[in-house]
Amino acid sequence: MTEEYNYLKGMQVYEKPISRIASIGVSIPERRVDNKEMASMVDAPWAIKTMLAKLIKRTTGNEERAYSPPGTKPSDLAVDAARDAFSRCSIKPEDIDTIIFSSTDLDTFEPATASPVSAKLGLKCVNCFDVSSACNSVLQAINVSNSLIATGAAEKILIVSGEIGSYVTNKKLERLGDLTVKMGGLTLGDGGAALIMEKTDDDRGILEVNLKTLSDYWECCHVPENIDWREREGVGYDLWFYLDMEGLAKTARKATTDYFTQYMGFRKERYGEEPFDANLCRIVPHQISRKFIEEIGGGLGLDMDKVVITAHRFGNTASTSIPIAVRTMTDEQDILNIGSGDEAFLYGAASGFSIGHVRVKL
């Protein structure tokens, strides 16, 4: 990757926010699959199975991933998370006028997975649709929700996601070289997330939104594994997760470094902030892997005490990883609470290759 991009062109900045996050709910399956158990689950030569657990830890830094029971649907995790979100605020399901399902996963190609979510919540007549931008889906749904609330097209929005990465993990390894495109799948976990959005009447809310896609790199990561499945008569398609780990890591590393460098310059010029995270309670990145986050954050000179990492505990739970990380901080450290005024920088990196952030005052 040699191109230079102006990542902040067109960034939305709100000195007075329009919308806020009223509640965050999560659904994290109880089962944990550690690297040793994952190694036992793969169909591979014995020599690979015996070294795989340590190889996963050395390559990614991840140790466990959350797995849901067989038969769980993305909408099930989304609904569980939604109920958790409603239990934590005064807003009721009947107050919701719009449901956005935002995930890499789905129950069916048609209709939108937002429809069974709505049905399971007992909401019989609301605006329901899906938004998909890989692991940045929830961030993109925040962007859409902010716009809908700004125009008056919606008042109370429920954003939900359900991710079952365990279902798309290709556990067949014929040779060690297969891990160049299958290692990423072995780190995937399952999870659900929900955010309730509404209009704000104070300084808490969405302060910045900036999301971009570097589409030259879309083939680095995709599901299904075979992108030419429509051309393969009689074969159909698989649902395996494909990740060119080296290619995507190279792209993501440069893009993330350049993005943060530009953003640091923006905050210094506009607000006199140095360091840029002076007013941030936490930086919450997409949880691709513990090792990647630590390497990039350290290289940028970030205060790693402010960088939230949960990938080693729950796995890469795709679009739900950022909400889960935020709630982990709320539940375990009593920070990033709704209504606290804590500021968080939600940084997304996703296949596409998509990149960007949402800055929010909670």
Image (cartoon, rainbow, N blue to C red):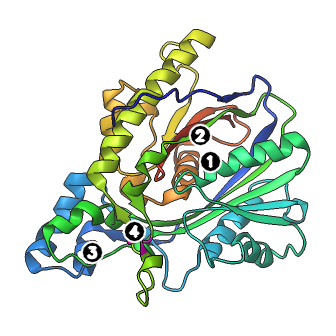
Query: Which image quadrant: the N terminus?
Result: top left
* Residue occupying the point 59% across, 40% down: 211
Query: Which image quadrant: the C terminus?
Result: top right
First in sequence, mark 2 or 4: give its number: 2
The image shows residue 324, relative to residue 162, as above or below, that is: above
Where does the image place residue 26, in percent across and percent down from the top left? 61, 60
First in sequence, mark 1 or 3: give its number: 3
C-alpha span from label 4 to label 3 = 20 Å
Q: Quadrant of residue 300?
A: top left
- In this view, the residue farthest toward the left is 47
Query: Element type at marker 1?
Result: helix
The magenta stretch is 224-228
Crowding near the residue tagged with mark 2, few <14, some 14–19, many ≥20 C-alpha atoms within 10 Å: many
Position of 357 with respect to 34 (left or right) is: right
- Amino acid on which the number 4 mark rests in the picture: Phe
Between marks 4 and 1 in the image, the one whose residue lies nearer the viewer = 4
Residue carrying label 1: 139
* Residue occupying the point 33% across, 75% down: 170
Residue carrying label 2: 211
Crowding near the residue tagged with mark 4, few <14, some 14–19, many ≥20 C-alpha atoms within 10 Å: many
Q: Are marks 1 and 3 in contact (CB under 8 Å)?
A: no
- Amino acid on which the number 1 mark rests in the picture: Leu
The image shows residue 54, relative to residue 337, as above or below, that is: below
Between marks 4 and 3 in the image, the one whose residue lies nearer the viewer = 4
Q: Are marks 1 and 2 in contact (CB under 8 Å)?
A: yes
Residue carrying label 4: 241
Q: Can residue 315 be spotted in the picture? A: no
